Amino acid sequence: MDETAVAKFSSWGSWKNRQARVIPDAEVVSDDGNVVAGTSGSVRLNDEQAFVWTPEDGMQEIRIPGRSGVKAEGLSADGNFVLVSAHTSSARAFLARWNRLTGKYDTVFDSVDETAYVWGRSITSDGGVVRYGSRDNNTLPTDYLWDELRGSRPTMDVLVEEYGLGPELD
């Protein structure tokens, strides 16, 4: 990250969001240091909101319609894709890959009820593949890989089917 970017990022201070003071917390930085993603927390509203920051555009909120508690969980090395988690008002878990250039997102995981949990683990350098974990109240955590073409698949299945690794990995 060049010194100009560091100075701009460190001097942004707090911003006003829904009339409450929020304090941004950087979570991940792109390889070139010019894209930062993180989560801000509202002191008064007890809510979280993901953001992305660049020296050119400053800080922008990452909005997922119908979702709250949006958190940045990962960032592609090129800085174009942010892995975000969120939930609905009924506590349904949600995970998405948000495109910084278009402002649109791809749903990676959307639970059918409030018993599921999801967490982002990582995203590839170009943002093409997302790794995440999921479980519900009655199961052990399962690791998944998601891509736009094939959707979500258990990581173990990918290792066996695409790389020929056997079930002895269990």
Image (cartoon, helix red, strand yellow):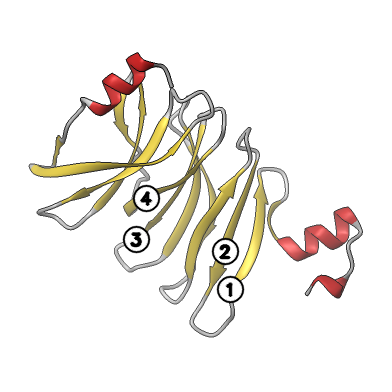
**Dot 1: what SS?**
loop
- In the displayed structure, 113 sits above or below 89; it is below
User: Between residues 35 and 2, which one lies in front from this camera angle?
Assistant: 2
- Visible in this render: residue 56? no
Residue at point 51%, 55% (across, down): 120
Q: Position of residue 55 (x, y in %)?
A: 35, 18
Identify the mark at residue 141; answer none if there is no mark.
1
Say if mark 3 contacts mark 4, CB within 8 Å.
Answer: no
Residue 133 — which label?
2
Task: Find residue 117 and report its horizontal and vertical position in percent.
Answer: 47, 69
Quadrant where the C terminus is found in the figure: bottom right
Measure the C-alpha gap from mark 3 to mark 2: 18 Å
Q: Mark 1 and mark 2 in contact? Answer it, CB < 8 Å.
A: yes
* Residue lying at 65% horizontally and 38% vertically, measured from the top left: 128
Which residue in the structure is indicated by mark 3? Answer: 88
Q: Are marks 4 and 2 in contact (CB under 8 Å)?
A: no
Mark 1 or 2, nearer chain start: 2
Q: Badge 2, how many Cα within 10 Å: few under 14, some, many 20+?
A: some
Question: Which is in the foreground here, disc 3 or disc 4?
Answer: 4
Q: Nearer the viewer, residue 92 or 44?
A: 44
- The reply to whether discs 1 and 4 touch (Cβ–Cβ < 8 Å) is no
Near mark 3 (Cα within 10 A), the count class, few <14, some 14-19 or many ≥20, is: some
At mark 4, the secondary structure is: strand
Within 10 Å of the Cα at label 4, are there few (<14), some (14-19), or many (20+) other Cα atoms?
many
**Mark identifier at residue 41:** none
What is the spatial separation of the Cα atoms under label 4 and label 2, in whole angstroms?
15 Å
Mark nearer the N terminus (3 vs 2):
3
Q: Secondary structure at mark 3?
A: loop
| Other residues around mark 1 within 10 Å, as few (<14) / some (14–19) / many (≥20) | few
Q: Residue furthest bottom?
A: 138
Spatial separation of the CA atoms under disc 1 and disc 2:
6 Å
